[in-house]
Amino acid sequence: MIKQLQKQWLVWPACYREDNPSLKKAGRFDKVIGLVPQQLCLFKTFYYQCDLVAHNELKDCVKNEIEQLVDWKQVALHFWTTKRDEQWLVSVWFWDADSITFTDSVTHIVPALAYYLACTSADRGTLIYQERAIDNTGKSDQVSWGVVWQSPQCLEQLYPLSSPLHYRRIETQLAAQDERVFSNADPDSCVVIKNKPLVPFNQTPRAAVLAQGKCGNQFDIDNPWRYWKTIVMFCVLLAAYLSADGALINYQLNQADQRVSQLARDTTQLQTHRAKALEQQKLLKEYNQARERQQLVARIMNKLANNLSKDVIIERFTYQNKKIVLKGSIEDTLGLLESISNIDEVTSARLLGEVTQTEAGRQEFQAELQVKEAGS
């Protein structure tokens, strides 16, 4: 996934007769690596005592010594460092920065031979590196170098294969059966690796090699841990921001709680008055309902006295649950229920039980009246 987000494009300088790929499809985060031909580089090895020179001082020491060797206005260098015994072994490629220009905008500048060395995956082995010759005759001859290493980043010498002595040295090295051989050359055009099994290169070089040749502020997606200081600082700032934000939120919550408590204290008296008012309203309502019921019963009694015949004697009158029960006697019950039902406050009337005849010739009855709701 990361390799798809950040691809690598290899380009050569304008002075080198090599076709560069089209960068129209290059993405924003892609790496455009400018390769410096080995023919335009010089290679030298320096040794420093570990107890005299610190690791972080090696670059300045190497740069000072190289500036005494050449008279270029601007020296560009790329170096590998390893510790062997009690010495620093520093392998340096250096070139004239003014003579190397790229037609495309590049994100990294690395010696071509160092780039292919960084793509190897073996702790020890041999690299046969080949590139097109730079000359003024327009020929397309190839030039080759051999590199032998016994431990990672431990390089002491480059062997130009144009020299018979160096060619025999590499040929002897390749004769070893367990030797791991890498090469960017075509086996048909490079006799020294013909019929030799070649180990494939890694798709991307080691991150430390590219980091040294970085010439912009591009973010390396494939190696974000190089920015651990920035990441730690960002995390610290984020933690400080979250802490401050949490403290502010906690302060605002406390302020809100205090305001709520103050409002609760301010409204306590109001709530007490409201509760008393509701209680009084409830009592008043109950009083009005009781009064309505009393007035209802009184109206029914008055209308009974007016509507019933004069010979009716009411012996008992009870009111409960919107029902009135009448018990009395009359000379003739015919038309009694009709007279009672004509009262507006009565919804229905019926006799309870049978009508009985007394010795005096009167008829005793018991009637139930269903009355309307008080206030309706």
Image (tube, helix red, strand yellow):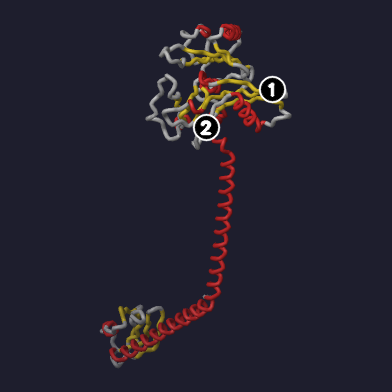
**Residue closer to the observer: 5 or 253:** 5
Instruction: Report the quarter where the C terminus lies.
Output: bottom left
Q: Position of residue 191 (x, y in %)?
A: 50, 6
Q: Position of residue 140 (x, y in %)?
A: 43, 12
**Residue on which disc 2 sits:** 214
Q: Position of residue 171 (x, y in %)?
A: 57, 7
Image vertical order of residue 333 relative to residue 155, above or below? below
**Residue closer to the observer: 107 or 305:** 107
Q: Residue furthest front?
A: 71
Image vertical order of residue 74 relative to residue 116, above or below? below
Quarter of the figure with residue 230? top right
Count the numbered circles shown: 2
Judged left or right of residue 44, residue 111 is left
Labels 1 and 2: the sequence-earlier one: 1
Residue 175 seen in this snapshot: no
**Residue on which disc 1 sits:** 84
Q: Position of residue 244 (x, y in %)?
A: 57, 55
Disc 1 to disc 2, how far (Cα)? Answer: 27 Å
Judged left or right of residue 88, residue 309 is left
Neighbour tally class for label 2: few under 14, some 14-19, many 20 plus, Cα within 10 Å: some
**Kind of residue at disc 1:** Arg
**Residue closer to the observer: 352 or 92:** 92
Q: What residue is drawn where x is 54% and y is 30%?
A: 74
Neighbour tally class for label 1: few under 14, some 14-19, many 20 plus, Cα within 10 Å: few
Q: What residue is drawn where x is 72% and y is 22%?
A: 85
Residue 163 seen in this snapshot: yes
Quarter of the figure with residue 53? top right
**Kind of residue at disc 2:** Lys
Secondary element at tag 1: strand
